[in-house]
Amino acid sequence: MTRSYYRIQYPVADRPRLLIDGVGHEVLDCSESGVRFRRVPGQPARYGQEIRGVVQFRRGTEIRVEGQIVRIDGEFAALHFTSVGIPFGIILAEQRDLLRRYPMWR
């Protein structure tokens, strides 16, 4: 199955944060349509849960997002954006920055 959106996978040192109710969760990968993140221990998450939060990128950009949890796998969860997501221009800027700083990822 091919993806409809380009997905960025982040090295550990450059992972964005997903702030939900003031709690920061590490983002493993993202696209225009969603993010996969590591849940903070003790923070509840359930399939179908509606989430509003802010994705904070390392370069300083912050994007408000809204979505629904569509997958939970142990300490990881996937959030699919339902109305507000990450603009494609931000995805491209993130990819360019990562390729500049990690040329071996090409």
Image: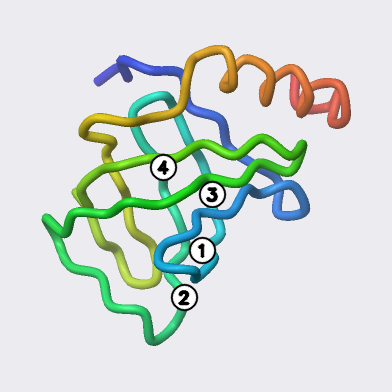
Residue, disc 3:
28
3D distance between C-alphas at marks 3 and 2:
13 Å
Amino acid on which the number 2 mark rests in the picture: Val
Q: Marks 4 and 2, Cα distance to the nearest angstrom? A: 15 Å
Q: Is residue 35 above or below residue 8?
A: below
Q: Are marks 1 and 2 in contact (CB under 8 Å)?
A: yes
Question: Compared to 18, does 45 lie above or below?
Answer: below
Residue annotated with mark 2? 40
Placement of 61 over or under 22, stated as above or below = above
Residue holding disc 4: 35
Query: Upstream in the sequence, badge 1 or badge 4?
Result: 1
The secondary element bearing badge 4 is classed as strand
Q: Earlier in the sequence, mark 4 or mark 2?
A: 4
Amino acid, disc 1: His
Say which label, 1 or 2, has the lower sequence index.
Answer: 1
Mark 1, residues whose alpha carbon is within 10 Å: few (<14), some, or many (≥20)? many
What's the residue at 30%, 47% (across, down)? Answer: 79
